[in-house]
């Protein structure tokens, strides 16, 4: 069963994988509501595919706006058959830094925003017995690394949330896809040291959408060789893992 | 205040995926459950302030989309179920609209009273029974539910509470009954119950080898039966078209019941706890295995042939066991599988009923979509504005819906609708999922619909109250 992605909402569409997926979907003929905080970026992107990409300015921290915005999008586009949640932040946490406000921002953007949008989509898709929810989680959610506790937490939580959602709605024909990218060349990773197997946002977007289009709900590393890394990382006993700077 | 405190509703009300009882239509709606009439009024007012639309939901027993409101609010009023007054001397009962038929008879049967009209299940709420003006197996004799309602309180979209009866606001009284909940929330129902002299009925079984035989059996018994219902094997065709079995029932007079007053006891009004040795809570799973055309055809044929063993015999049966066949198998609606089913009930005038109903059954055969269950009833007109009743007959049919048959099934219902409308027939909203605006206009008449819309305009000028059924069939197209 292949999944249709003809009218899609992408949250976090102004940069990185969200932006790349918006282009990819527009090229494939889909109508896409591109949702992001930065109006300039949205307008620029929308201008590339007039009539295909429609901009909606929204800060995912404003979770209360989501129900009304979802309705507005459906009034403009018609019933939506896909939601991509690509919004995510990963502020740098310095050695010795303990910054709750950074943690809060990550929980808000990476997790609460995802829940706010996915609740809207899941209810509609369950009722329609169709639809795709794609969440960009991360390999960072596989283990609590010392570098950024809150980021790992939000991604682990998002992975679990998506798994629950999949178990909750896949029996009603809803396609719930968890994408766990490795290193992707975006603003988020720019300047980071020790990157390997780096792929472009375009490549990551293509791979992710190809998985979503298969229509068989699931979770996947992108590209798939990261599954091996995840396996190793998960298998390391804690007394070794805590000594690593990974 | 539970989730009612989560305002504004537009941003904070929880979503709920709800279905019609037939499971073939669904909607994601904002869903709140008020715990009192005051909370209900607050929820309506809050929705109005926010420009959200509202439908009231009781037990969710309408087969189609009557209690769904895609994108709007569903206010679940089933918790407002207090019995407000009961007078065994007069048989007059007052209750909130969330009280169910079950909650009602359990409180009145030991005083010797039974609801004058009940549907085939005891789960619906009084509010739902009013909104749909439900009918029972005695429609030909005592009319619909609404004829036994003495008075209603209606909470209007403007927040006013109006008392409606046959003297006061009589026009509105006759429009709210059968008004699909589109004129306001019924918050209080005052009903007249039927005095019965026994907790049992005398039931007679008559088998008929075709539709004419079934209808003949009905007509012979019409003058004195209290209840009449026919089961039709819709798989049978040719000379056996419309074969089945009629159950006719009479109230007992004092002294006719060997058990006497003991038969009134609630404990003696039970449904069988197992059927053919199977625990009935799991029986739907067995039915699910049979829920395909070849096997269900066999089940229907077996039921028909075995019915002849009871032919001409009679027995005593409790009110509950006779009235609530649909409650024998809990969750039976699941037996039709994940696609659910639609129920489709046609009402046809007496004069041409035989031919019309034969044509209906034939059209199903031609489409290779025989109904899995057919129920025949006799009706008479009533004074309500949006009434589905007429001097004639109805045939209710169940069609399972699957991904594969959906298009063919909808096409069949279009042909059936055309045939029925051609005969001057009508349909019943509580069982509808398929009618279109034009069909409803022909069935209910433009004049009556305009009269209803005028009342709606007066009470609900901003169209606060809507439902998926209303938008599909009666709302003026935008």
Image (spheres, rainbow, N blue to C red):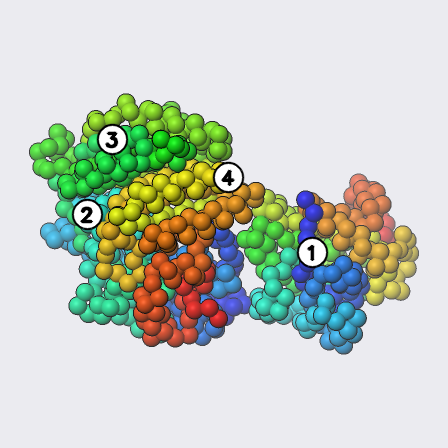
CB atoms at circles 2 and 1 under 8 Å apart?
no
Q: Where is residue B72 shown, x and y percent of the image?
A: 48, 64
| Residue at left offset 90%, top offset 53% | A196
Q: Where is residue A137 shown, x and y percent of the image?
A: 73, 54
Q: Earlier in the sequence, mark 3 or mark 2?
A: 2
- Residue at label 3? B206
- Residue at label 2? B141
Horizontal side, residue A246 vs residue B441: left or right: right
Q: Which residue is outermost to the top?
A: B309
Alpha carbon separation for disc pair 3 and 2: 20 Å
Q: Earlier in the sequence, mark 2 or mark 4?
A: 2
Alpha carbon separation for disc pair 1 and 3: 57 Å
Few, some or many residues within 10 Å of mark 4 (<14, 14–19, 20+): some
Residue A5, numbered label? 1
- Residue at label 4? B337
Pick the front one: B283 or B37: B283
Given the image, what chain letter belongs to the residue carrying mark 4? B
Q: Secondary structure at mark 3?
A: strand
Q: Secondary structure at mark 2?
A: helix
Alpha carbon separation for disc pair 2 and 4: 36 Å
Few, some or many residues within 10 Å of mark 1 (<14, 14–19, 20+): many
Given the image, what chain letter belongs to the residue carrying mark 1? A
Disc 3 and disc 2 on one polypeptide chain: yes
Given the image, what chain letter belongs to the residue carrying mark 3? B
Pick the front one: B352 or A13: B352
Any part of residue B157 in sight: yes
Few, some or many residues within 10 Å of mark 2 (<14, 14–19, 20+): some
């Amino acid at each position: 069963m292949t999944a249709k992605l003809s009218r899609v909402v992408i949250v976090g569409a102004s940069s990185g994988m969200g932006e790349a997926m918006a282009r990819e979907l527009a090229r494939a003929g889909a109508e896409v509501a591109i949702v992001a905080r930065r109006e300039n970026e949205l307008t620029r992107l929308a201008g590339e595919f007039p009539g295909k990409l429609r901009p909606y300015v929204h800060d995912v921290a404003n979770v209360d706006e989501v129900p009304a915005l979802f309705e507005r999008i459906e009034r403009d586009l018609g019933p939506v058959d896909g939601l991509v949640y690509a919004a995510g932040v990963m502020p740098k946490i310095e050695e010795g830094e303990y910054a709750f406000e950074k943690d809060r921002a990550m929980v808000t953007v990476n997790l609460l925003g995802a829940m706010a949008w996915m609740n809207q989509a899941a209810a509609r898709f369950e009722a329609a017995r169709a639809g795709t929810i794609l969440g960009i989680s991360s390999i960072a959610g596989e283990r609590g690394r010392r570098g950024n506790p809150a980021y790992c937490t939000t991604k682990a939580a998002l992975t679990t949330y998506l798994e629950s959602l999949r178990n909750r709605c896949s029996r009603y024909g809803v396609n719930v896809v968890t994408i766990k990218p490795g290193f992707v060349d975006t603003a988020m990773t720019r300047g980071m040291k020790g990157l390997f197997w780096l792929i472009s946002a375009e490549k990551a977007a293509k791979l992710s959408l190809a998985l979503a289009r298969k229509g068989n709900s699931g979770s996947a590393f992108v590209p798939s060789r990261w599954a091996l890394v995840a396996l190793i990382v998960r298998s390391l006993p804690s007394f070794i893992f805590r000594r690593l700077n990974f | 205040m539970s989730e009612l405190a989560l305002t504004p509703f537009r941003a904070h009300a929880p979503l709920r995926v709800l279905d019609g009882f037939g499971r073939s239509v669904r909607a994601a709606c904002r869903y709140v459950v008020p715990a009192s009439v005051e909370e209900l009024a607050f929820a309506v007012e809050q929705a109005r302030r926010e420009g959200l639309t509202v439908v009231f939901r009781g037990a969710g027993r309408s087969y189609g989309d009557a209690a769904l409101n895609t994108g709007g609010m569903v206010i679940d009023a089933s918790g407002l179920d207090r019995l407000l007054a009961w007078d065994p001397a007069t048989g007059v009962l007052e209750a909130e609209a969330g009280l169910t038929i079950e909650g009602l008879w359990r409180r009145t049967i030991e005083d010797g009273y039974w609801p004058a009209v009940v549907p085939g299940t005891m789960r619906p709420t009084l509010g739902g029974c009013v909104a749909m003006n439900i009918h029972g197996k005695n429609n030909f004799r005592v009319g619909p539910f609404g004829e036994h309602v003495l008075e209603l309180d209606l909470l209007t979209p403007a927040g006013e509470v109006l008392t409606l009866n046959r003297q006061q606001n009589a026009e509105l009284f006759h429009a709210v009954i059968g008004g699909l909940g589109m004129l306001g929330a019924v918050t209080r129902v005052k009903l007249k119950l039927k005095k019965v002299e026994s907790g049992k009925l005398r039931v007679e079984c008559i088998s008929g080898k075709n539709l004419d035989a079934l209808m003949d059996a009905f007509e012979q018994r019409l003058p004195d039966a209290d209840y009449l219902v026919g089961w039709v094997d819709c798989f049978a065709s040719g000379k056996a078209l419309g074969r089945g079995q009629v159950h006719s029932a009479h109230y007992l007079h004092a002294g006719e019941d060997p058990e006497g007053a003991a038969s009134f006891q609630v404990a003696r009004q039970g449904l069988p706890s197992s059927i053919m040795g199977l625990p009935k809570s799991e029986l739907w799973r067995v039915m699910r295995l049979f829920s395909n055309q070849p096997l269900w055809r066999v089940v229907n044929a077996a039921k028909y042939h075995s019915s002849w063993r009871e032919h001409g015999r009679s027995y005593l049966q409790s009110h509950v066991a006779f009235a609530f066949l649909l409650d024998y198998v809990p969750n039976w609606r699941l037996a039709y599988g994940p696609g659910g089913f639609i129920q489709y009930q046609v009402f046809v005038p007496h004069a041409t009923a035989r031919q019309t109903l034969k044509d209906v059954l034939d059209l199903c055969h031609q489409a290779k979509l025989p109904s899995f269950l057919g129920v025949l009833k006799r009706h008479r007109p009533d004074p309500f504005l949006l009434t589905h009743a007429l001097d004639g007959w109805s045939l209710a049919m169940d069609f399972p819906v699957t991904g594969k048959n959906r298009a063919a099934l909808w096409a069949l219902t279009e042909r059936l609708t055309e045939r029925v409308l051609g005969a001057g027939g009508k349909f019943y909203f509580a069982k509808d999922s398929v009618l279109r605006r034009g069909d409803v206009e022909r069935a209910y008449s433009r004049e009556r619909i305009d009269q209803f819309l005028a009342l709606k305009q007066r009470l609900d000028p901003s169209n606060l109250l809507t439902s998926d059924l209303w938008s599909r069939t009666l709302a003026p197209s935008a």
